[in-house]
Image (cartoon, coloured by chain):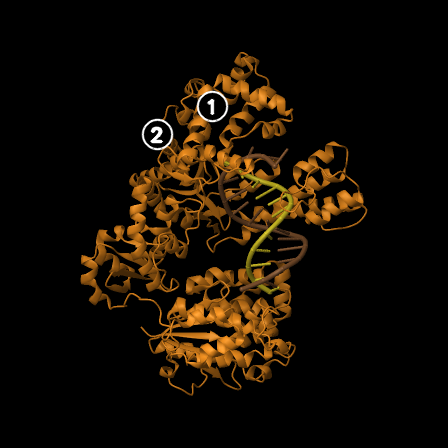
Chain colours: A orange, B yellow, C brown
Amino acid sequence: MAKLLLVDGHSNLYRAFFALKTRLSAPDGTPTGAVYGFLRMFHKMLRELAPTHVAVAFDVSRETFRTRMLESYKGTRQPMPEDLRVQVPLVQKALELLGVTLLLTPDVEADDMIASLAEKAAAEGFEVVIATVDKDLMQLVRDPHIKLWHTRLERLLDEQGVAEVFGVPPGQVVEVLALEGDASDNIPGCPGVGEKTARELIRRFGSVAALYQHLSEVTPPKAQKALAENRELVELSRTLVELKRDVALPFALEQLARRPPLPELAEFYRSLGFASLLSELGPAPSPPPVSPAELPALPWGELLPSLEKADLLACRLVDGQLAIACAQGFASASAEKALAALGPRFFAAWCYDAKALLSGLRDAGVAVERSCQDAMLAAYVLAPGETVELSALCTRYRVPAPPLATPEGELSALLALAPKLRQALEAEGVVEVYEKLELPLIPVLEDMERVGVKLDVRFLAELSTKVAALLEAREREIFAEAGGSFNINSPKQLAEVLFSWKGMPVLRRTSKTRAPSTDADVLQELALQGFRLPALILEYRELSKLKSTYLDALPKQLGPDGRIHTRFNQAVTATGRLSSSDPNLQNIPIRSELGREVRRAFVADAGKLLVVADYSQIELRVLAHLSRDPALVSAFERGEDIHAATAALVFGVASELVTPDMRRAAKTINFGLIYGMGAYALSRELGVSQREAQAFIDAYFARLPRVREYLEGVKEEARRTGKVRTLFGRVRHIAGLDSENANVRGNAERMAINAPVQGTAADLMKLAMIRTYESLKAQGFPARLLLQVHDELVLEAQAEAAQDVASLVKATMEGVASLAVPLKADVGVGPSWAEAKG
DNA sequence: TCCTCTGTGCTG
DNA sequence: TCCCAGCACAGAGGAC
């Protein structure tokens, strides 16, 4: 297939210039940093994108039709720095020697030229890729045949990619830029409306025109006022950012076909001192830089017989179509058609990131209830905590990396990786974890992400206003006490105030830079010593954290449906847990009273209720099972308060004589065990001497000897094999167990102790989620899983069904495995997360 | 300008 | 010299 690469010369050259400023020059002293940076990037694109046609566009004059529309348009722009200007002819010469067509058209901006050319080529059946860092070119990705190679992110963006990176889909890029302006192009936008507001407003209203039709509904009031006052400027900005797509093209597209580099190129590179770029030119001076062997693109009907016979398939989504590859080549068809043709063989096909694939298929109107094979997850269970990037996998499993940014490149990499991954899963003994836990979890997580959780934004806004007032009051007190103003949020400035101005003692230094620490522990201690400022700072910090991370940040993540759609990442943690991001909903406050208020904002939709279920003491129960310690097991079997029971045991008193302090100490040791805590950490935690802490630990192990034996056994196994396993066979590789450095070794040992416990709990929860999801579906319950917070599940159910759902979830969680101790789950029902848990 | 690092703090 | 596993914020300073 013909593929046209259009390079925005201007933005890429500027970027290369600033990145490599003053760091390179030719033997004669001419600066060459920008030339080098540009060419290195250019060669990389040729390699990764493998285009058949290439052109690079440069601006040649500053006078264009736009300058006439806005006097200031580009008027205030700095002239090109001299050091950069002298490099332009060098870049152009190199490109010519590379056999690349230059587009230098007076009176037309390079962006307009690119726009016109891209649309023409797309109409003629080209795949078009535009290489730029400029935001305004993103508008062109509206056309499904046009994609954007973001040279900074080194990522190929399709329509969805633009939406991810820019915040709105390509069709709305112009609308957003009309509001926020574009500093690099001197587009004013609306003063007072920045990046965040602009994107939120367009997400809500859709366009500048619609925004002005509903101006009275615009919030915040500040934005409404700014928009009302700058209507003309906004509308002019909108005209300016819209690219011209009707520039006459004085040549045929075929003239842009790549030509072999000229023999003089090598000499030219040598004269500039670009030794490393010479290797890009290949062994001989003349052969064209052709990409490595690619899968041939074939019409669907032609590939189909091969697909039906093939024993290895790879797939991915391309523009809403499902592309399928086998050794003979690749082809794409509508998701529906492709899935119908594949039938159950889809489940054996390999993709990268199946959750994204399933989600895309669903967007394309096809709901698949089971996942296909996933190279990302296979790589994850093989080496959790390591990167699962596709290019890294190619290196790790020794398969040649094709141009991975292209669909055919990714598909051929998957075809090469799949057998290696399958073999490695078997060799490592993690096939079960992959097939029974990770793959079945994919549709569950996809559904949770899609459903999202409703947020009461008005409640958060009110709370934010209250906290803002409290913060201002605290700030005044702090400045009065400090005797001057400073940025309280800056640890550096705060340290200056506390330790230099006020002369308080430096209690601890940070580990990375040895700067005086100002963390909560230090402030707490200083407050205890009678200083007033640290106590105020502690209060300020709590409020500030709450406001910036939760009260103000969460509403910004709201989807158009009024719900928050977090991402549950399945291939991140080293222990097998999930993680949550964008936003992280696994760290919503609960420990402090004010923080807990945030959970009131997570609410059930009308007519529904939230059902919350959390495992009680899951990790300690896992430890009891793994160690089979009789005292621990029987305490759980009898359903005792586990911390009180261990306190009675360790302190040798009857259970009714356990004091709160004794229970607290036992609780700390119980938790500490799971983390491999030592006497030093325990002494700090309990506020006792290290000797006393050691005595506690000795007493603990004397009463619970099997726990000690288990922990020693895990360390021994880890030292012998370099890895540890969960009850379900999930593996974690651990380095450093034989290190000479006691610090490194201690860290490794603690990881070895913690991973099986934390990981087994994670496995149990994953299985419980899969079963809950299946049961709800099979029994037709009007309820959906929404969130997982490691040992807790949050569901939303029709109010009438909520109690039954609660019973089902509880039974499912408790019955997920039969351990040496019972599993216990507590459930609650309520209108909000806070109330359902209470 | 954007990106990365650092310190800090929230959760289980 | 802190106790495992995460993610996100603000500030500060350098740069593919």
Image height check: is A565 above or below A182?
above
Residue displayed at 47% across by 56% down: A560
Closest to the observer, A641 or A1: A1
Q: Going by the image, does A698 lie left or right of A714?
A: right
Q: Quadrant of residue A666?
A: top right
- Indicate the position of residue A783 as horizontal and vertical percent values: 38, 41
Quadrant placement of the N terminus of chain A: bottom left
- Indicate the position of residue A176 as horizontal and vertical percent values: 53, 67
Q: Are marks 1 and 2 in contact (CB under 8 Å)?
A: no
Please rate how many residues cluster around mark 2, counting C-alpha atoms within 10 Å: few if below 14, some from 14 to 19, many from 20. Answer: some
Q: Going by the image, does A784 lie left or right of A541?
A: left
Per the image, the residue denoted by label 1 is A708
Residue A243 appears anywhere in the view: no
Image height check: is A780 above or below A124?
above
- Indicate the position of residue A140 as horizontal and vertical percent values: 45, 72
Residue A601 appears anywhere in the view: yes
Image height check: is A62 above or below A213?
below
Q: Quadrant of residue A63?
A: bottom right
Q: Which amino acid does the dot numbered 1 rest on? A: Arg
Closest to the observer, A809 or A342: A342
Q: Which amino acid does the dot numbered 2 rest on? A: Gly
Image height check: is A530 above or below A495?
above
Q: Which mark is residue A815?
A: 2
CA distance separating discs 1 and 2: 28 Å
Q: Secondary structure at mark 2?
A: loop
- Residue sitting at the far top: A654
Q: Going by the image, does A665 lie left or right of A528?
A: left
Chain letter for the residue marked with disc 1 in the picture: A
Chain letter for the residue marked with disc 2 in the picture: A
Judged by depth in the image, the label closer to the viewer, 1 or 2, is: 1
